Amino acid sequence: MTPIKFEELKPRITDAIQAKLRQTPVLGENGFTIVEGFIMQPISNEMSGNIIIGGPSIPLVAIVGNTSGRMYYFALKALLPDISI
């Protein structure tokens, strides 16, 4: 599989996030900053207190509200449903 590079997708990601925020505005924010890279959120079928490295994960994109510093996460596949991951 060819690696997916954040920098190559950044313009499309930015457009998709802006479209989502028009549908559901983030109140009290003075814009946002995109975190420059993917966040891989591990998923598990059980809770044992162990950390599993290399298991299944959900690729996310994060933004940080410029006013509050709150982080908001978007599933990459929800932003760009046409990409193959």
Image (cartoon, rainbow, N blue to C red):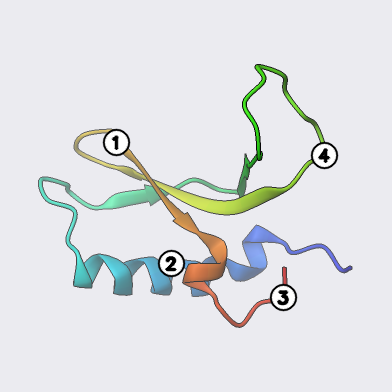
Camera-nearest label, 4 or 2? 4
Q: Which callout, 2 or 3, points at the residue further toward the start of the chain?
A: 2
Q: Which callout, 4 or 2, points at the residue further toward the start of the chain?
A: 2
Camera-nearest label, 1 or 4? 4
The CA span between labels 1 and 2 is 17 Å
Residue 5 position by quadrant: bottom right
Query: For the residue carrying disc 4, how many other residues have a C-alpha within 10 Å: few (<14), some (14-19), or many (20+)?
Result: few
User: Which quadrant: the N terminus?
Assistant: bottom right
Q: Amino acid at mark 1?
A: Arg
Q: Amino acid at mark 2?
A: Thr
As helix, strand or loop, the secondary structure at mark 1 comes to: loop
Residue 84 position by quadrant: bottom right
Report the disc number at residue 84: 3
Q: Position of residue 48 (x, y in %)?
A: 67, 20
Q: Check disc 4 and report the residue beneath it.
A: 54
Q: Check disc 1 and report the residue beneath it.
A: 70
Query: For the residue carrying disc 1, how many other residues have a C-alpha within 10 Å: few (<14), some (14-19), or many (20+)?
Result: few
Query: For the residue carrying disc 3, how many other residues have a C-alpha within 10 Å: few (<14), some (14-19), or many (20+)?
Result: few
Q: Which callout, 1 or 2, points at the residue further toward the start of the chain?
A: 2
As helix, strand or loop, the secondary structure at mark 2 comes to: helix
Q: Which callout, 4 or 3, points at the residue further toward the start of the chain?
A: 4
- Furthest toward the right, the residue is 1
Q: Check disc 2 and report the residue beneath it.
A: 14
Q: Which callout, 1 or 3, points at the residue further toward the start of the chain?
A: 1
